[in-house]
Image (cartoon, rainbow, N blue to C red):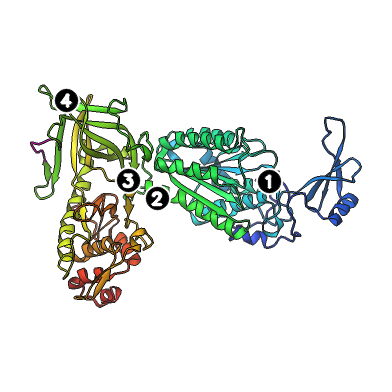
Amino acid sequence: MMSGDTSNTECRPGDPETMVPKSANDILASVHLKERLVERNISEAEFDAAIKYGERTEGDVLDDGRKRWKISYKGITIITDYDMKVGITSWANPCFGFDLQKVPITDDLRKKNNEALAKMNEHDSWNSHAVIIIDQSGSMRKTDTTKGATRSDLVWLCLAVDYIGKRIVSGEASSMDFMSIVELGGSDRCILKHQPIDWILYNKVIDYLRSRLPKGPGRYIPAIDTAQQLLSINKSGKCALQLVFLTDGVPSDYGGQGLCKYEACNRIASLACRFGSRLTVGGFAVGSGELLVLEAMVKTAKEYNCRGFLMEASLRVEDLSSAFRSMSTFITKTKTTMTDFRTGKQRTYRDLIREPKSAIEVYIPSEESWKKFMNDASKLRVRRTYFDKYEYCWVYPEKVFEHRNAVGIAVRDYIFGEGKERAVRRVREVNRLGHFVGRPLVGKETLFKEDLKEKNAIAFHKNFCKVQQLASRFARKFNNILFSLPGIDDMRVPTIEFLNCWVMMYDDGDERKGLLVEKMLDHAKYKKWNSNAGYVRNKTSDLECKPPFRFKEPDISFTIQDIPQAFSHYTYLASRRKFLVCDLQGVLDEKSYYPKFELTDPAIHYKKKTTRIDFGRTDRGEEGIQDFLNNHTCSDLCRFVSRRWIVDPIEKKHCDL
């Protein structure tokens, strides 16, 4: 059971799903190894037994001609001098004592694997590609984990069982999800390239568990370079991407941690600026692994809107197993975000280049990365329009620009923000000299190629305008009820407001383009209070440190944090349970004369799906409404503003009325 081909028949027959352990802990629980001390701390009794009974082979010959012996005995390897009196080093052998069975590969499984490999060059068919960089440097030999397994064994075991096996069983991964593995340390090379996630891959990882031997220094930069090449082969924007580091120590690259961090972050930035939110970058610090470089890499990725995570997993198998399951959820979330709820197919990201969020405060009009479009007496290149939901048509006002001296707009080449549907880039109004005038603005456009097939440049923006206008109408009603509270102080209690938005049409060469434009919010203060997927912000922010608002008539108290959640619930009841406004995001402006929540990009869940009312892809209908209600707990404010609409006894109980 210590070696074998991935398709051999050493395994017991049976259903693959029943052969996969529930977790890696189920495997280590059956290991009857003696708890080992750390590397080189072999007891004298073990050393004597190895000398007497072990299998002996000649080891490497030193430069001065001295010889060594390599002795293997009961799962450990000892290197001694030629007289076998001095122990020089030792390590645990890979997978010693593990009872992990491989899955029998049937003709049907092999056929599906061959079909996936045949489609590998059809890049649009890939659902995802995960590149896993696994530390195989010398420190991964240490036997300080659960049941004395090596650190390397623990990582391979959890990768096989918790990341690959459980995803196949649950249906999270299919043969059109691909994986590559790069060794960090030892060979510093790709040992597995673009393989479908199936039971054949599962067996291959078990082979690595049984055979890979950690050795040498752990160099980050060569491993990242290899990962860059692997991730860049598939040019399709339909493929969700993941890059994960599994390491237990400080990088061994030349120049120390400082230079390594600089070089690693530059390489991560070059990936992140191309892939943005469809790339997840994560790191596992196994045991007491050093986090400095990993932290910097993940932070850099997030600057370009990538998903990022950093986990510290102890040397207990339960912790590492749980961490691997969490790792798998990130790529599943990315695939879900990319999926069109209507068709069930993953959409294609546009080829957009990103700039870091930290750069958006810098405005240099002379930069080549700003394109300027200006009106003059001979041609009207820029027009302003907005959607009138009452007239149900686009209106073109006579006033095109906000600033009185503006004659055109400057549009940034790079995007700096991404939502579930749209990309965000910087926009400024410019005067006749090309200088910026007026306040900073943002322009929003689709992230996905499929939306570029719309009949004209503004059709894509219609739903967003409709949603924001309807949300604004209900916000005004909510604010009126809020201020009906006796003793309310409108200079203390913030109101709900949605930004005004409009569409700027401009001619870029022969192409007519349209950007939905609105005021730029402070990205450093930007928050999401709830989402269209049921998330409700917990009361853990700095806002909760402030004393609540208290009133005697009626006897209620509430916090600032309660206001957005109360508004979302209010819209559902005030619309007579037809829809709910959620995905509330933006900034809380407490410095203005009248404090307010400045919100943008809301979503509306409409209870009944019809062709007449369409609130876009973020509309999840009744399911989305129920997700919010299940996670929402009514506050005093919520009960006050919603009281008049609640007549159903079950709903009264839900709202504690």
Q: Nearer the viewer, mark 3 or mark 2?
A: 3
Q: Amino acid at mark 3?
A: His
The residue located at (87%, 54%) in the rendering is 49
In the depicted structure, whether residue 508 falls above or below residue 327: above
Where does label 3 land, which residue? 523
Q: Residues within 10 Å of mark 1 (few under 14, many from 20)?
A: many
Q: Would you place residue 560 above or below residue 247 in this image?
A: below
CA separation in Å, label 3 and label 2: 25 Å
Q: Is residue 398 magenta?
A: yes
The three-letter amino acid code for the residue at tag 1 is: Ser
N-term-proximal mark, 4 vs 3 = 4
Q: Nearer the viewer, residue 618 or 135?
A: 135
Q: Secondary structure at mark 3?
A: helix
Badge 4 amino acid: Arg
Which residue in the protein does label 2 denote?
336
- Name the quadrant containing residue 213: top right
Instruction: Residue 289 in the image: state x and y as whole percent.
Output: 60, 49
Closer to the eye: label 1 or 2: 1
Give the residue number, with chain letter if any, for mark 4: 432
In x, y percent, where is residue 215? Answer: 70, 41
Q: Where does the image place residue 445, in percent across and percent down from the top left?
A: 27, 39
In the picture of the structure, the residue carrying the numbered disc 1 is 139
Separation of residues labelled 3 and 1 (CA atoms)? 41 Å
Magenta part of the chain: 395-400
**Quick check: 511 left or right of 103?**
left
Q: Are marks 4 and 1 in contact (CB under 8 Å)?
A: no
